[in-house]
Image (cartoon, rainbow, N blue to C red):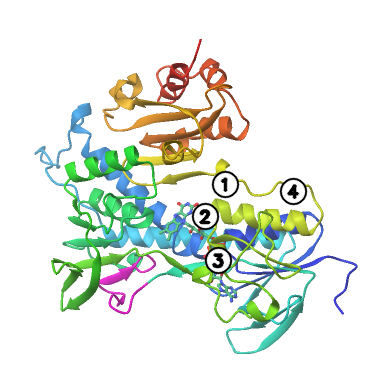
Amino acid sequence: MPDRTVDKVVIIGGGPGGYESALVASQLGAEVTVVDTDGLGGSAVITDCVPSKTLIATSELMTEVAGAAELGVNFHDVEGDAATTLSVDLARVNTRVKALAAEQSVDIGRRLDRENVTVVRGRGRLDGPERVVVTAPDGSEQTLEAGAVLIATGASPRTLPSAQPDGERILTWEQVYDLTEVPSELIVVGSGVTGAEFASAYLALGIPVTLVSSRDRVLPGEDADASAVLEEVSKRRGMKVLSRSRMESVTRDGDVVTVTLTDGRSVQGSHCILALGSVPNTTDLGLEDAGVRLKDGGFVGVDRVSRTTARGVYAAGDCTGVLMLASVAAMQGRIAMYHFLGDAVAPLDLKKVASNVFTAPEIATVGWSQQAVDNGEITAEVVMLPLSGNPRAKMQGVRDGFVKLFCRPGTGIVVGGVVVGPRASELIHPVSLAVAESITADQLAATFTVYPSMSGSIAEAARRLHRV
Ligand SMILES: Cc1cc2nc3c(=O)[nH]c(=O)nc-3n(C[C@H](O)[C@H](O)[C@H](O)COP(=O)(O)OP(=O)(O)OC[C@H]3O[C@@H](n4cnc5c(N)ncnc54)[C@H](O)[C@@H]3O)c2cc1C
């Protein structure tokens, strides 16, 4: 029988869904074990968010430098001749990316150690709802008893039989950091967030990019005005965007990669990144035998406090498919721990989640969307203000982007917003705060902003929502 004197928690998966929950559970006095196979931090730290945003830090710099002449900055070589080309050392960039990810993973390990969380290296699976069997890399097994188990095993890149990565020229997003030479022609298949981010990043690094999109527009899940700005800017900077073009297969012949489309057309390049979405890591985990019901696509079904259908088994993060973001994974995991350990708990509220697409320009959103307003799911007043009129934007040579705010007609409470522009990920915060705390557009407008600042546009948009 499990020892009930101390709450024992076993977490399978060491990504943000797992390690953030471990910290909370330990803080609340539980005895916590994290079982992880691939390294603490999970895909978020080792292959997904951290590496991609580190790569994007280099592309942002390239974008800024490319715009330097307009601000009066010229580059010269030692003889004083004007520099005409800007190039990236991809091997160095990738070395930096991998080192930073590895350091972050080590930092997380140290933090867990300080908080008395036990980390067990190996693959975990349920043996009933209160027992986890761990297979270590050397094949040995150990069984851990638990009052609660949290499944936080994440997801993996989706591939197709007709589009198999080879790790050299046909790549998943996990494999791009092994590139040592700059692709001469890159094809990105998939125009969701991951595809759009990589296409935008590599374009900024000076690589010719073709984006293959099966939909009418890039980022079909985002605000339509925002994706129109991104598409316009990307095309202006030289990206080829093939809309309504569904990939049938990706093949390689020597140094040439061919993407064949379902309508018979084909595109050739030197490398291809597959960004076809993710599949949950939920096979061979003993889930269904333990009473955990899976949803379509193999995702773990959870309620808003992260409970599965098996008593004592919780799930968080990408394996639930609720909203594939590191921040949401972490919140789902924390909520599970608060719930199990009897702390105050507020169920997950997706309408308060701020998210960002790290393209150039960035697209940040929170709360209700334009689509929900247009569909009549919520009645809201909308104002959209281009950034081109903002004084700081003019000084910085920023012409693309906008601020959009949604507020309820009667109360004026801000219920959502979209920011498109450089560092939109930082600019969205006041809007998130307004949405989370039910602040009105008038209150947002009455809050001082620095002059001149991009955030001045948020206050100005709020002012335009004022009704007498
Ligand atoms: C390219 C890319 C960029 C992204 N950028 C961002 C971003 O900027 N911001 C953001 O919020 N989100 C971003 N995301 C999404 C984010 O990476 C995920 O939402 C996040 O990683 C989910 O965390 P998780 O804990 O559910 O899973 P993961 O981070 O995938 O961690 C799961 C861990 O569990 C381990 N595991 C799996 N099975 C077992 C088992 N049986 N036993 C033991 N361990 C196991 C895995 O090895 C892994 O280490 C990005 C995703 C991609 C693909």
Left or right of 421? Residue 272 is left
Vertical position of residue 360 compared to residue 415: above or below: below
Q: Main secondary structure of the magenta part?
A: loop
Magenta segment, which residues? 159-175
Residues at marks 3 and 2 touching, judged by CB atoms closer than 8 Å: no
Helix, strand or loop at label 4? It is loop
Disc 1 and disc 2: Cα gap in Å? Answer: 8 Å
The amino acid type found where label 1 is placed reads: Leu
Mark 3 Cβ and ligand 1 under 8 Å apart: yes
Helix, strand or loop at label 2? It is loop
Residues at marks 4 and 1 touching, judged by CB atoms closer than 8 Å: no
Pinpoint residue 243: horizontal percent, then vertical percent.
22, 54
Where does label 1 land, which residue? Answer: 350
**Image quadrant for the N terminus?**
bottom right
Residue in view at x 74 percent, y 75 percent: 129
Disc 1 and disc 3: Cα gap in Å? Answer: 17 Å
Pinpoint residue 318: horizontal percent, then vertical percent.
53, 62
User: Looking at the image, is mark 2 or mark 4 earlier in the sequence?
Assistant: 2
Helix, strand or loop at label 3? It is helix
Identify the residue at the far bottom of this view. Answer: 139
Residue 323: mark in rendering: 2
Disc 1 vs disc 3: which is toward the camera?
1
Residue 345: mark in rendering: 4
Disc 4 and disc 3: Cα gap in Å? Answer: 22 Å
Q: To which quarter of the image does residue 115 belong?
A: bottom right
Mark 4 Cβ and ligand 1 under 8 Å apart: no
